[in-house]
Amino acid sequence: MAKKESTFTNMLLTLFIVTLASSAALGFVYEFTKEPISIAKSAKKNLAIERVTPSFDNNPGNEMFGVPADGDSVYFYIARNGNDTVGYAAETYSNIAFGGTLKLLVGFLPDGTVKEIAVLEHKETPGLGDKMLKSKTNWSTQFEGENPSEYTLKVKKDGGDVDAITASTITSRAYCDAVQRAYDALEKGGKQ
Amino acid sequence: MNQGRNFLKGFIKENPVFVLFLGLCPTLGTTGSALNGLSMGLATTFVLVLSNVFISVFARFIPDKVRIPSYIVIIASFVTIVDLLMSAYTNTPGPHGEPSLYDNLGIFIPLIVVNCIVLGRAEAFASKNSVLSSLLDGLGIGLGFAFALTLLGTVREVLGNGSVFGYKFITGDGILIFIMAPGAFLALGYLIMIMNKIKQRTAKV
Amino acid sequence: MEYIIIIISAVFVNNIVLSQFLGICPFMGVSNKVDTALGMSGAVTFVMVIATIVTYLLQQYILEPLGIGFMQTVSYILVIAALVQLVEIILKKVSPSLYQALGIFLPLITTNCTILGVAILTFQKDYNLAEGVVFAFANAVGFGIALVTFSGIREQLELAEIPAGMRGVPIAFIIAGILAMAFMGFANIV
């Protein structure tokens, strides 16, 4: 196979053609996958919201607003059934978790009662802190049905009502911190 | 060499992970479970086969001095295509909200472009051989890579989680260190040692 | 204060090699002697910081405004390849001995997942340019620490009696695993 000569024009031309062909091909594939990608993204969001709020018929992923909280924001999604607001999903966080940042999605009923909580992102230790995941244990169900106005979101050791995960007090504290942050944001400006 | 041998060499004799020690980053980073390892292996195979074929066809038109940058652009394009396809079609979370396959493979999908195996095969084989040979070479080495990743993923999942491809056969947790960072190193180290032993024995026989 | 957290996190808690699994090939390949390890770390630091800056600017001022974010992988890797060529040329002139010592590993920095990995991570974490530079530098330091520590251990290992099946690569991986376990102890210090 005779190779082309490495003259300056040849090299430049080749690189130009290759890059052009690449951009064109990728542009084409991008256009083709743009819709499925955004559908997958919003389905992910809605699936998470579905897990923590009562059933709704709107598209909460599209109705998002942020409430500032401690330097960052808590993001709210409104769940509606017809004209009634049936709940809110709050994307909240805590910076005091064992592995860094912990992100939760807390589902509230309109009066502030917690319906269910899902973990969005965590770096906690497998076998210890990750017991907060619903897929691992039922630990998080103790929050369900409780209203933070009457239920103190602190571990029992700190004078609250929450049973900490055995040997994972730090994770438990961070979890409570995140839920409290969500509730405070809800009261401050989340009920729209 | 005949095409049969060409295809099979990637599995044992010239297995990219256990023998050539190439492509180690995704090997350690995506083998927390058998499914993740297998998916990563298949995604890499996809890129490897396509880039091998493409480069085999067009190598003669590319001047020698710019061949590496050109190959890189070609490989990067196929990697981007895989990335786009996976973020569209393998991005569904699990029933309890577990991360999707796309999330699990994460940064290692774009990193296929710097997987030494892909550029290595393009440079060493595809640019000098026929399209059919290059295709089989890419397929064999890619599937050998997938085999290694799936094996390591299975070992780590069985020991660390007591499950295989998601089917748990114990209650509770396994030896958790295996699904964490150090476990990847340990499991791979022992696997390579076992492979060495097997090679020694079969060489004697 | 933010910067301190970025540094400690990148160097110890989420060490690029022992926790994120990037840069394993050079980690295994260049870690036989402490001097080569130091040289490699220096080269990687230099390339990583500059590459992060250039790719950041590329993303911010060309890819995003033109809506061609999907060209990220292609453009990033081209930038990195060009940069490594540049470093090679400079190094040949400035320090021929180091150039010789690094040998094949210098062009291999292009296919080093750390550079591309850190560039992509900087984008994913939404850092601004200053934070990005600190992040890149810290990751390079983390890489260097892991590499030099590992090579120190391997130099000592030359004098130890290792079972035949374990010699070379397998024992290296086992040691790396133990080192990774040690680094896990850094969790929760930020």
Image (cartoon, rainbow, N blue to C red):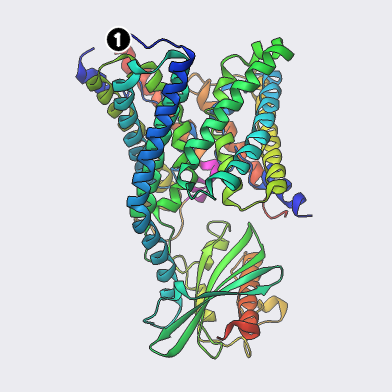
C14 or A141: nearer the eye?
C14
Circle 1 sits on which residue? A1
Q: Which residue is drawn at 58% across and 88% down?
A: A147
Q: Residue at x 53, y 58 (%)?
A: A127
Residue B180 painted magenta: yes
Tell me how many marks there are: 1
**Residue A13 location in percent, x, y?**
43, 22
B32 or A72: nearer the eye?
A72
Residue A26 painted magenta: no
Kindly tell me whether residue B17 is visible in this rendering.
Answer: no
**Residue B136 location in percent, x, y?**
25, 24
Label 1 resides on the chain identified as A
Image quadrant containing the N terminus of chain B: top left
Q: Which residue is drawn at 23% across and 18% down?
A: B5
Give the overall secondary structure of the magenta segment: helix
Q: Within 10 Å of the Cα at label 1, are there few (<14), some (14-19), or many (20+) other Cα atoms?
A: few
**Residue A19 location in percent, x, y?**
43, 31
A124 or A72: nearer the eye?
A72
Q: What stretch is highlighted in magenta?
A: B175-183
Kindly tell me whether residue B103 is visible in this rendering.
Answer: yes
What amino acid is at disc 1? Answer: Met
B33 w.r.t. B112: above or below: below
Image quadrant containing the C terminus of chain B: top left
The answer to which image quadrant residue B22 occupies is top left
B170 w.r.t. C154: above or below: below
